[in-house]
């Protein structure tokens, strides 16, 4: 799997893309900050060890795997879970109160439903009944316990999930629809990021005799 090792410092998951911003400029083509799938799962594992651990773990996984904004994740209830043509989805109300359907991986969909049932969460009750501030605190506390010094925040999960999805599919248009971007300029930043990582990995394999 493609990783971001080539563009970040080796310790504490600290991305070092500021020099690259100078190369790509300050327009919409500049790369985004992100962490890898494995690194997100480290955060999720740490969250699971906390109080309300299962809820906190599922919040991180939902933000990442479904690429949700924190406002979108915190509004989720069991009734937002649906199946369309056999595909598990979440019915989201995004920016500007615009509705969209977001694909939800089968395993995550099952875990969300199972958790809601065991926790006694009713159809219209929120799956994650916390504030934005608390969500940020949970993620930052997990990062701190893992020894991550750089800023780790809720929206970083969305960025990371978007890069990961693009690496898996290569389909920029479907990603734009998944993210709910009206303009493709932001979505193009994920393509720039993916191409940058892949380029560094390919060119990093080139060796010379002296």
Image (cartoon, rainbow, N blue to C red):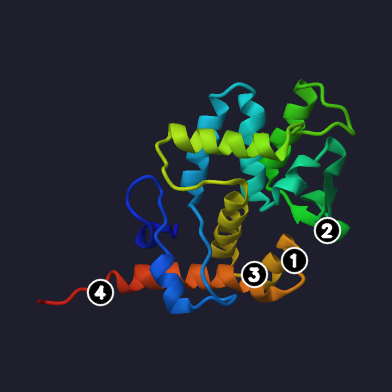
The nearer-to-camera label among 4 and 3 is 3
Residue 113 falls left or right of residue 151:
right
The nearer-to-camera label among 3 and 1 is 3
Q: Earlier in the sequence, mark 2 or mark 3?
A: 2
> What residue is disc 2 on?
100
Q: CA distance from mark 2 to mark 3?
A: 16 Å
Q: Earlier in the sequence, mark 3 or mark 1?
A: 1
Q: Are marks 4 and 2 in contact (CB under 8 Å)?
A: no
> What residue is disc 3 on?
187
Q: CA distance from mark 4 to mark 2?
A: 44 Å
Determine the secondary structure under disc 4: loop
Q: Residues within 10 Å of mark 4 (few under 14, many from 20)?
A: few
Percent from the top left, x then y, of residue 58? 65, 36
Q: Are marks 2 and 1 in contact (CB under 8 Å)?
A: yes
- Quadrant assignment for the C terminus: bottom left
Q: Earlier in the sequence, mark 4 or mark 3?
A: 3
Q: Is residue 80 shown above or below 137?
A: below
Q: Earlier in the sequence, mark 2 or mark 1?
A: 2
Q: Quadrant of residue 54?
A: top right
> What residue is disc 4 on?
206
Q: Are marks 4 and 3 in contact (CB under 8 Å)?
A: no
Q: Is residue 134 shown above or below 175?
A: above
Q: Is residue 43 shown above or below 201?
A: above
The nearer-to-camera label among 4 and 2 is 2
> What residue is disc 1 on?
177
Task: Tell which of 192 and 104 is nearer to you.
Answer: 192
């Amino acid at each position: 799997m493609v990783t971001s090792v080539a563009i970040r410092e080796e310790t504490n998951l600290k991305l070092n893309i500021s020099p690259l911003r100078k190369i790509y400029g300050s327009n919409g083509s500049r790369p985004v900050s992100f962490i890898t799938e494995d690194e997100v799962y480290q955060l999720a594992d740490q969250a699971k060890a906390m109080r309300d651990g299962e809820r906190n773990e599922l919040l991180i996984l939902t933000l990442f795997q479904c690429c949700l904004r924190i406002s979108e994740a915190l509004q989720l209830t069991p009734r937002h879970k649906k199946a369309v043509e056999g595909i598990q989805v979440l019915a989201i109300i995004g920016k500007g109160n615009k509705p969209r359907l977001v694909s939800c991986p089968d395993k995550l969909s099952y875990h969300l439903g199972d958790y809601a049932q065991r926790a006694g969460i009713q159809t219209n009750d929120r799956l994650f009944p916390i504030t934005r501030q608390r969500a940020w605190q949970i993620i930052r506390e997990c990062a701190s316990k893992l020894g991550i010094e750089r800023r780790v925040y809720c929206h970083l999960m969305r960025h990371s999930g978007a890069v990961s999805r693009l690496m898996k599919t290569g389909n920029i248009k479907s990603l734009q629809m998944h993210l709910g971007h009206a303009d493709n300029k932001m979505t193009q930043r994920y393509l720039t990021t993916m191409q940058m990582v892949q380029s560094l990995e390919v060119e990093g394999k080139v060796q010379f005799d002296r």
